[in-house]
Image (cartoon, rainbow, N blue to C red):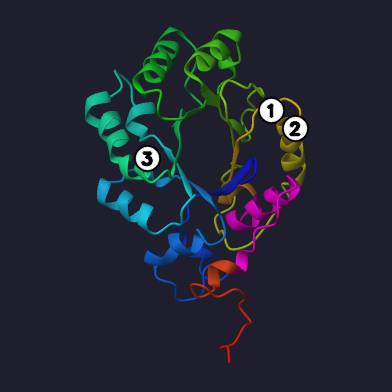
Amino acid sequence: MGRYWVGCSGWAYDDWVGPFYPPGTPPGEFLSRYARVFRVVEVDSSFYRPPGPFLIRRWAERTPEGFRFALKMPRDVTHESGTPPVESVLAPFLSSLDPLRASGKLGPVVLQFPGSFRAGPAGVARLEFLLNAVPSEYPLAVELRHRSWWTEATRSLLAARNAALVWSVVPETRPPPWVTSDFLYARFIGDRALTTFDRIQRDGTPEIVAMKRLFEEEGRPVDTVFAFANNHFMGFGPGTAAIIAETLGEPRPDLSAAGRASGQSRLDLGPSG
C-alpha cells in the first residue's frame, strides 16, 4: 500500500462543495466521496464532541476496506485542568472506536495539547498519566507545541509508550523530528488568517519539501507515515493533500474521483454500448 498515508484534517466542509464535492452533494455523502480519493482522514470533530458508537459504525460502513481514521482525543481530556476524566470521557471514547478496530480501520489516536501546555511538574504528570491511560493497543500520537517539551526526558517518555511526537507545521513552534514510535505523524496546520477553503490561496511548498527531507532522513527507519493537510495551511485541504502526496513521490490523488458516480472510472465517460 505504500509508506505514506496522506489525507485531510476532516471531510465535512461546505466550502468543498463545488471544487471537490459535486454541487448539491448532501453532507451524508461527503465521507463516501472523500474516500474515493484518499485512504485516510484525520477526524477533527472528535476534539470538540466525541462521536457516538452509531456514528462511528456508519463511518466504517461508508468507507472501503483499507481506509483509516485517525481521531483526536476530546478536548476535555487534554485542555481542561484537574485530573483527566478517564472514566467519564477517555474510556467511553476509546470504547466507541470498537467498530473501527473490528474493521481494521482505526489509525492513530491523537492527544493534541494547547500551546500553553508546558513541561512543568503538573504538565509532565498529566502527560505521563495520559500515556499510561491509553491502552497500548491504540496507536498514539502526541502533539506538543510549547518548546519547554523539547528535552530528552520528553523524548524518552514518548518512546517508552511507543507514542509518536506529532511533527506539526504551525506558526508558533516547530517540534524536533524525533522518532519515538513505529510510525510518523505530521500535521500541516498553518495560521488562522484564511477563512474560506475553496481553493489553494498560498504556497506551502517550502514547508512540504522540508518535511519530505525529514521523512527521508530523520524518519528513514519508519515504514508508516501519516500526513494530514488542514484547510488553513494553503486554503484548500484536498488540493494541499494532493500536493503533499506528489511531493513525497506518491501518485497524485485524482480529486475528480469525488465527483463521479459510484463505479464510474472517468467523469467524461458516457453510458456504454
Q: Which residue does the numbered mark 3 point to in the structure image?
A: 101
Q: Which residue does the numbered mark 1 point to in the structure image?
A: 219
Alpha-carbon span between mark 1 and mark 3: 26 Å
Residue type at mark 1 is: Gly
The quarter of the image holding the C terminus is: bottom right
The mark nearer the N terminus, 2 or 3, is 3
User: Which residues, given as a range, are shown in magenta?
Assistant: 234-256
The mark nearer the N terminus, 1 or 3, is 3
Q: Position of residue 195 (x, y in %)?
A: 55, 55
Residue sitting farthest toward the front:
273
- Marks 1/2 in contact by CB < 8 Å: the verdict is yes
Q: Which residue does the numbered mark 2 point to in the structure image?
A: 216
Quadrant in the rendering for residue 170: top right
Between label 1 and label 3, give the one nearer the viewer: 3
Residue 44 located left or right of residue 168: left
Residue type at mark 3 is: Arg
Number of callouts in the render?
3
Q: Position of residue 70 (x, y in %)?
A: 46, 41
In this rendered view, identify the residue nearer to me: 49 or 109. Answer: 109
Alpha-carbon span between mark 2 and mark 3: 29 Å
Between label 2 and label 3, give the one nearer the viewer: 3
Q: Is residue 245 magenta?
A: yes
Q: Residue at x 39, y 39 (%)?
A: 47
Residue 139 located left or right of residue 173: left
